[in-house]
Image: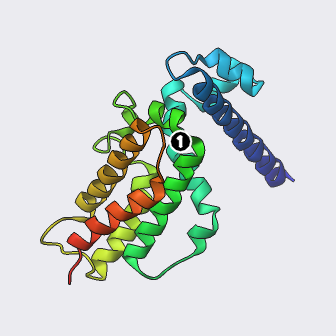
């Protein structure tokens, strides 16, 4: 009985956190990051300030939770269960999914999130969930001698992939989302991965 109660509380906590996160996304998309207030987020989520601070230390912390939410969504998706048994295909499949996910969230949020003021983007300080997921595929590739270890390291390759994707994403935002982000990032990453793959 105690375990069931504990599980119910955990589920309620996750539900509240997700509700606040989704409310924050809506407010940021409508008002922009700078004009978004925590009070406005709480109003949209129909929750208290105390509840907000239980799950997030600040407005910045909501942005950082984007990565956790993205990977949680990926883990629950059919793509996650589709083990292609090919390192490059796994990396491309993951970033195809990520491009679709980002596109769904929209250009306005991406402009807010993928900006120099967001400290969650500093991969030297924050090794986020997207990077960790990619690193699993890359590490497998190095173990299987897919990638040339004389050219790069697992973490170096991971950072390069991240930079290629973010560069395309920034261009997509600058172009107001007027082209297919998934197709473009797939092309760029395919070209890059060929360059670091052992022939």
Residue named by callout 1: 66
Q: Is residue 45 above or below residue 186?
A: above
Q: Residue furthest right?
A: 1
Q: x, y (%) of residue 63? A: 51, 34
At 36% across and 27% down in the image, what residue appears?
A: 117
Q: Is residue 115 above or below residue 151?
A: above
At 61% across and 18% down in the image, what residue appears?
A: 38
Q: Is residue 136 above or below residue 85?
A: above
At 59% across and 73% down in the image, what residue appears?
A: 81
Whether residue 27 sits left or right of residue 128 in the image: it is right
Q: Residues within 10 Å of mark 1 (few under 14, many from 20)?
A: some
- Local SS, label 1: helix
At 47% across and 37% down in the image, what residue appears?
A: 176
Whether residue 184 sits left or right of residue 101 in the image: it is left
Q: x, y (%) of residue 55? A: 62, 32
Given residues 87 and 136, the one toward you in this image is: 87
């Amino acid at each position: 009985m105690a375990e069931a109660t504990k599980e119910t509380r955990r589920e309620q906590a996750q539900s509240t956190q997700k509700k606040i996160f989704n409310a924050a996304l809506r407010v940021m998309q409508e008002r922009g990051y700078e004009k978004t207030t925590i009070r406005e987020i709480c109003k949209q989520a129909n929750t208290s300030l105390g509840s907000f601070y239980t799950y997030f230390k600040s407005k910045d912390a909501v942005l950082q939770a984007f990565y956790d939410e993205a990977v949680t969504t990926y883990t629950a998706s059919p793509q996650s269960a589709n083990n292609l048994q090919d390192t490059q295909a796994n990396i491309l499949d993951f970033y195809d999914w990520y491009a679709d996910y980002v596109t769904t969230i929209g250009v306005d949020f991406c402009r807010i999130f993928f900006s120099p003021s967001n400290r969650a983007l500093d991969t030297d300080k924050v090794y986020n969930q997207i990077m960790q997921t990619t690193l699993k595929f890359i590490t497998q590739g190095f173990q299987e001698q897919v990638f040339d270890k004389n050219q790069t390291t697992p973490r170096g390759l991971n950072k390069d992939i991240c930079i290629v994707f973010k560069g395309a994403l920034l261009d997509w935002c600058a172009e107001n989302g007027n082209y297919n982000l998934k197709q473009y990032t797939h092309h760029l990453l395919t070209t890059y991965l060929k360059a670091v793959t052992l022939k």
